[in-house]
Image: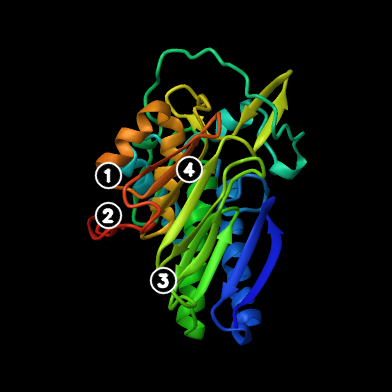
Amino acid sequence: MVGTRTWTVWGLQAVVVTESASALEAAVQLVQQVLREVDEACSRFRPDSELIRLAGRLADGSDVSELLALLVARALRAAAWTDGDVDPTLGNDLSALGYDRDFAQLKSAAGMPAAELALSVPRRPGWLRLQLDGRHLRVPADLQLDLGASAKAVAADLAAAKVNAALGCGVLVSLGGDLATAGPAPGDGWEILVQDAEVDPRQQVLLPAGAAMATSSTQKRRWEQNGRTLHHILDPRFGLPAEPVWRSVTVAAGSCLRANALSTASVVRGHDALGWLRSLQAPARLVDRRGNVMMTGSWPESPYAPAEEMAHE
């Protein structure tokens, strides 16, 4: 019999499911330890995080912890996979748009139509200006790191791997819909309900052992600023919320980091996402603003990364 625990962290729902119920308590403690360590390393909203404490020194370059270096390296990997559509240097843009504190403290505007924003001239990609050499990090003074999306995915990957290594049991870790698994799955696989908002179409799929999945949404993390409704997925070219062509995009892959990178980039790419995902043979499920569902790759018959995609992990 499986064990399940749910709680709230970072304004999101965290879920841990263990193949064996007897391993649940120990697994939850391990997952919570990983989440604390990631939060202490890179939170943009707590003054005692390593990222904020070092902010004044990063323009000249500074040695950082092994964990922060790993989180930045993985964020740069996600940027490279997506040709910069997922950019970890948008902290100043998010703050300017009002996302300058934990999301739970913002005035939520979930369900409200997003504002139409005027786009300007595309700018130089910030992620290409970061310098990471081992544990030595340099961030230009005009940029602020926001590792939110990629760090959440990496945290899920790290937590699932840690539980499996320590306890030897199969585990699923979900952080706000970003799923990572490790070890054996119960039965034929992990049963996952794919649905973003309650009004959206739903689908039940089986996720095989070791696979991961992520959903990026333009519907849930919305807030109001100066009478405008904004969402949190920015187009790095302009530092503004991407056009909400898709209500949500769900991608399966060999790691949560890659699944999250592809799902986030798909929102940024808008109408071009379908062709891009098909070129990658990525198993994905896209829901447009009218609720129409489109699928790519092997979804839903086999919603996980094929061997050629796994090679990118």
Residue 300: x and y in percent read 40, 53
Provide the secondary structure element on which disc 4 rests: loop
Classed neighbour count for the residue bearing mark 1: other residues with Cα under 10 Å, few (<14), some (14–19), many (≥20)? few
Q: At 55% across and 43% down in the image, what residue appears?
A: 55
Mark closest to the chain's N terminus, 2 or 3: 3
| Label 1 SS | helix
Residue 102 in percent (x, y) is at 70, 44
Query: In the image, which is nearer the foreground, mark 3 or mark 4?
Result: 3
Residue depicted at 72% across the width and 26% down the height: 224
Whether residue 288 sits left or right of residue 307 in the image: it is: right
* Mark 2 / mark 1, whichever is N-terminal: 1
Looking at the rendered structure, the kind of residue marked 4 is Leu
Circles 2 and 1, Cβ within 8 Å, touching? The answer is: yes
Question: Spatial distance from mark 2 to mark 4, Cα to Cα?
Answer: 34 Å
Q: Amino acid at mark 3?
A: Ala
In what element is the residue under mark 3?
loop
Q: Residue at x 63, y 24 (%)?
A: 114
Q: Mark 2 belongs to which amino acid?
A: Glu
